[in-house]
Structure formats: structure tokens, C-alpha cells
Amino acid sequence: MKTPQNKNTTNGFTLVELLVVITIIAILAAAGFAGGNAALNKAKKVSSQAGAVSITTAVEQFYAEYSALPDPGTNDKDVDLDSTGDGVGLLEILAAIEDSTSDDVQNPRKIRFLNNKEGKRDRGGIIYSSNGDAVLGMYDSWGGAFYIWMDYNYDDRLDFTTKQTGTAVKLNGKKCAVYSLGVDVDEPSSATVSTLVKSW
């Protein structure tokens, strides 16, 4: 006996089923992207914090060796140095590549106190000149500067306000404190207290 066959049956998905599957995939992709972005930002923060801590550690080691703080020419008061500007001289002293023809060589034993990774395209580390005999700057993972506060009063106290966020910081027993804004270099106004990358 033959069974009747229905010629109207199809072996595909309906439009509604396809739309449901596409929607589920889009939701999962968005969740994965958000999680991946958060993980990437956390990795940048950890890397930048290591850079900030490496500067403070280098300053402390320099002080232990020479009983003075490294001075790029501003030691009359507690001062805020920018690792991409007026703080470059400090980085060169700590990296033992300061100008040896200067009358005021501060690291005569040529001890390399600062051993931070080399950055790429002005991000994530120290940028050296093409021949390696000068520091051009030191950048956080977002391409921003590190701000370095030094205790040139030698009173073991640092009292300052962070850039952009206006956060008041009072530290006792510190010779140096370093922070960066922790945001993209093109968006400094988006910095908040929670984005700051600090050495303390």
C-alpha cells in the first residue's frame, strides 16, 4: 500500500527561525566584545602600573645609592615632571644614559636603575632615540605621559593634585609618586579617579 506524500513540505528553516538564530548570535557577539574590551583595558592598566612602579623603584634605588634624589634641574621644591617632556632628563639619569660631558653628572657610576620595557609608537614603555643614547619619553599603554612627583624638599611628604581629575593626594614617607591618567591620549577629559594608574 502506498502512503500519500505531501508535496508542500520543505526541508529548510522558516524566516522566524533564522531571525531568532541571528539575534542570539548578535547578542553573544556583543557580550563577548564587551568582555574582551574590559580584559584588554585591565591588561593595559596592569602594564602601565608596572611602568609607574618601575620609576618609583628606580628613584628609591638611586636615593639609596647616592643619598640624593636625581635632579633634572628643578630641585628647589616638590615638583611634577612629565615623562614625555621635562621629566625626560630624570629618566636618562635613572637609565644611566645622561650626558656625560655635563658638569653635573648625577649617576657617575653608570648604574642602570630604570629597566622598563621599550615602547612602540609612543605607547607602553620607554622610547629611545634611534642610536639609543637618549630617552625621548616614557608612555603608558594609552599613549599618555606619566606624571612624576619628587620630594625635593626632603621632608618625606608629597602633597599634590592630579591632573584632569583634581584628586588631592597626600603621601607620607615617599620620595616619589608616579601616576598616569589611564585613558586614551586623545581623550584626557575622560579621566576619572577610577581610571588613574598609580604607583602608591
Image (cartoon, rainbow, N blue to C red):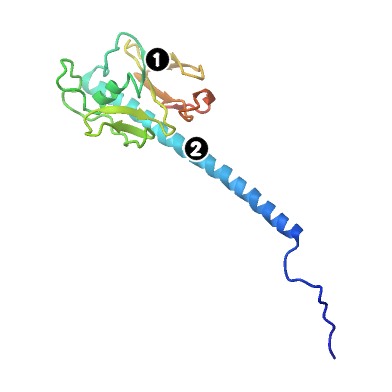
Which residue: 49% across, 37% down? 41
Secondary structure under tag 2 reads helix
- The percent position of residue 87, horizontal first and vertical second, equals 32, 20
- The percent position of residue 109, horizontal first and vertical second, equals 16, 26
Question: Which of the 4 image quadrants contains residue 51?
Answer: top left
Q: Which residue is mark 2?
A: 41
Residue 26: mark: none
Amino acid carrying label 1: it is Leu
**Quadrant housing the C terminus:** top left
Relative height, residue 60 to residue 40 (above, below): above
Compute the Cα span from label 1 to label 2. 29 Å
Q: Is residue 114 left or right of residue 41?
A: left
Judge depth for marks 1 and 2 and give the one in front: 2
Q: Which residue is mark 1?
A: 158
Amino acid carrying label 2: it is Asn
Secondary structure under tag 1 reads strand
